[in-house]
Amino acid sequence: MPVECPLCGYGKAESLESNEYKDRDGQAYNCKRCGKFFIAGSFVCFISQMDVHPIIWAWVREKTEFGENVPEFFGETIDEMMKILKVPNVTQKTYKLMKAYERRSKYPGQKVSLDPKHDFTLAWLNNVEEFKYFFKSLVERGLLADPGVVNANVQETLITHKGWEYLAEHESQPPDTNIVFVAMDFKEEMETAWSEGIKPAIEEAGYEPIRVDKKPHTDWIESEIIRRIKESKFVVADITGQNEGVYFEAGYAMGLGRTVIITVRKDDSKNVHFDASHIRQIRWKDTAELNKGLYETICAVIGEGSKKK
């Protein structure tokens, strides 16, 4: 039965009862406006009394939309997030709204709909009125088709040819996100390279590493990989083992204009494919060397992410 969301106050939230949360002190929710989140037991009584900024709703909804880790709220979490989250500008909000329609379009020409009452968070907007303003602007610019008679509750439309061109033009620009796609061999011998080298280095630099075998998804693996790369700020590709899939993912990311940081274990560096041999590589002997080299490169080339502590 729907309950009032303790984050946004919208009466379309459900209490999640799953094995993941049953032994934990707190409550998990799935809100149509905010998405999925968990509140620690000691904080449950206080969060509903707080004036939570819509940017928090949007941040949680985006994580849910992209299948990322479910955010967990404790005593200081919201204050900490407000210090590091950046409110998107008009251009970024426009792109986010177009991407929301794109994700729901299985093919060009398909009509899709968003409900302003709960979907304004998809574009990091503040409320329904702002959603309608941006929707009208996209129609006037010819990026979305004019829906004619507009349903007060649902904005159904389709992306125009000009809209698809707009999305293609902006796809080469790294998104305003902390997500980092990691391409690497999934063999057991590489697990320590991930757990002790790559993952902690990316997190220490203020970003969230994503590896497709570590995330649940229902799409074919190829489409999931492509989607994840498109949504990433940059890509880390460890080519140890000379896995053809890793080379493909790195090449695809480069084609999109993403920065690709390549790493390779020193004893395998002599086997690097000719096409990649001229690209700068972080050559590592052990996980400590991998961690240090990757962290320093990210900070120097990309800069620190907003999750940097």
Image (cartoon, rainbow, N blue to C red):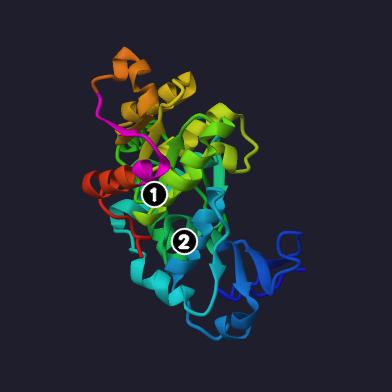
The quarter in which the C terminus is drawn is bottom left
The residue lying at 47 percent from left, 62 percent from top is 58
Spatial CA distance of label 2 from label 1 is: 20 Å
- Residue at image mark 2: 59
Q: Could you tell whether 139 is left or right of 71 in the image?
A: left
Task: Say what secondary structure mark 2 lies in.
Answer: helix
Residue 276 quadrant = top left
**Residue 280: image x %, image y %?**
24, 29
Q: How many marks?
A: 2
Which one is nearer the viewer's eye here, 143 or 282? 282
> Is 288 covered by the magenta stretch?
yes
The residue lying at 29 percent from left, 58 percent from top is 89
**Residue 192: image x %, image y %?**
51, 41
- Residue at image mark 1: 202
The quarter in which the N terminus is drawn is bottom right
Task: Say what secondary structure mark 1 lies in.
Answer: helix
Q: Could you tell whether 304 is left or right of 24 in the image?
A: left
Quick check: 36 above or below 77?
Answer: above
In the image, which residues are magenta? 279-291
**Residue 221: image x %, image y %?**
58, 30
